[in-house]
Amino acid sequence: MAQLNLDDRRSVWLHVHVPKAGGSTLRQLMNRNFSPGYYNSNSLLETKQYTQYDVSEIVRCHPWVTCFSDHKLSLDLPYDHEHANVLALCYVRDPVERFISRYFFHRHFEEVNCIAQRMSFHDFAVAELENKDVHPQTNSQIYFLNGGVSDTDMTVIESAVATGRAFLFPIERFDESCILLEQQFPDHFKDLSYVRANVSKRDAEISEDDREFVRSHLQADFAVFELAHRELDRKLDETFPDHSVRAARLAEFQELCGRRHHNFHPPREKGEPAPTSAL
């Protein structure tokens, strides 16, 4: 595994935003930690991804950018860029939970017409996973991260991780990844405490049979999910070899997140009405 060594060039973090893998929360954190050098690009065509050359030109032509977030980014990036230390941050998610979350997101996203708005979860799953009524990168995180090579080929992903400049983590362990980033890059990530954003409203239960149906069709995607867990474990062991120190740091971080959450959602007794706005 390559040893990360940053020189005097400016560092540019590229947030490879896998849809429905915690990216909206992370975008808020990137904006807080990198503003005014942060740029968030919302892709209208999410299935058109940038090439290495495209990203290289973005970094070269926009020297004010220190952090860039986009659905158009894959892990096929110019890590050896002439003008900048390019680093990638990417979160993946349990493939079944991600599929379920995307169903409910589109079901309630009235601005875009989607079959989820007129289908049960089972019919939606059949349409997308069996009938293939969707672009392959939509449900395959591997396909998304390797820039459309295939839904099973991990070469691009593993090569990116091997550079030491691509940080691949599971969103289910977001808090652990945050204390790791704050510890390793204190100049870049001064405060990653957060309040969750863009949480999909769920108005139906998903049966175990439907979960198994989804799992059977997304089995290949568990390879990248498992790699993300291994990478986080490895980096945590390197950064916090004393597990008691790690546990204390994690507890401190989660307490800070709790205080930030209460700033937006003040706790109240059961049955007590929500406070009315003074505006």
Image (cartoon, rainbow, N blue to C red):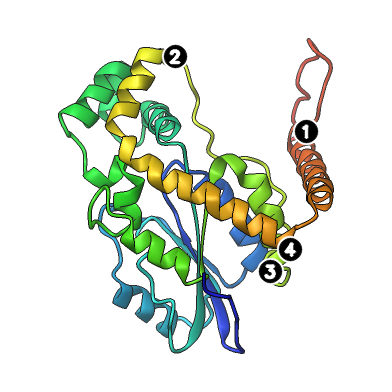
Sequence-wise, which precedes: disc 3 or disc 1? 3
Residue 99, horizontal then vertical, whole percent: 38, 32
Q: Which mark is residue 278?
A: 1
Residue, x 75% and y 58% (percent of image)?
Answer: 240
User: Mark 2, mark 1: which one is toward the viewer?
Assistant: 2
> Which of pointers 2 and 4 lies earlier in the amino acid sequence?
4
Q: Is residue 53 above or below residue 98?
A: below
Residue 122 falls left or right of residue 96: left
SS under mark 3: loop
Q: Single out the mark in the foreground, 2 or 3.
A: 3
- Say which of 193 and 163 sits in front: 163
Q: Residue at x 35, y 13 (%)?
A: 209
Tell me the kind of residue under disc 4: Gln
* Label annotation for residue 185: 3
Distance of label 2 from label 3 (alpha carbons): 41 Å
Q: Can you identify the residue that label 4 sits on? A: 183
Instruction: Of the two numbered discs 2 and 3 on the same chain, state the one appearing first in sequence.
Output: 3
Within the image, what quadrant is residue 197 found in? top right
Q: Give, as a three-letter code, the residue at label 1.
A: Ala
- Is label 3 or label 1 in front? 3
Which quadrant would residue 115 be assigned to in this image?
Answer: top left
Residue at image position (60%, 82%) is: 6
Circle 2 is placed at which residue position? Answer: 204
User: Which quarter of the rendering shows the C terminus?
Assistant: top right
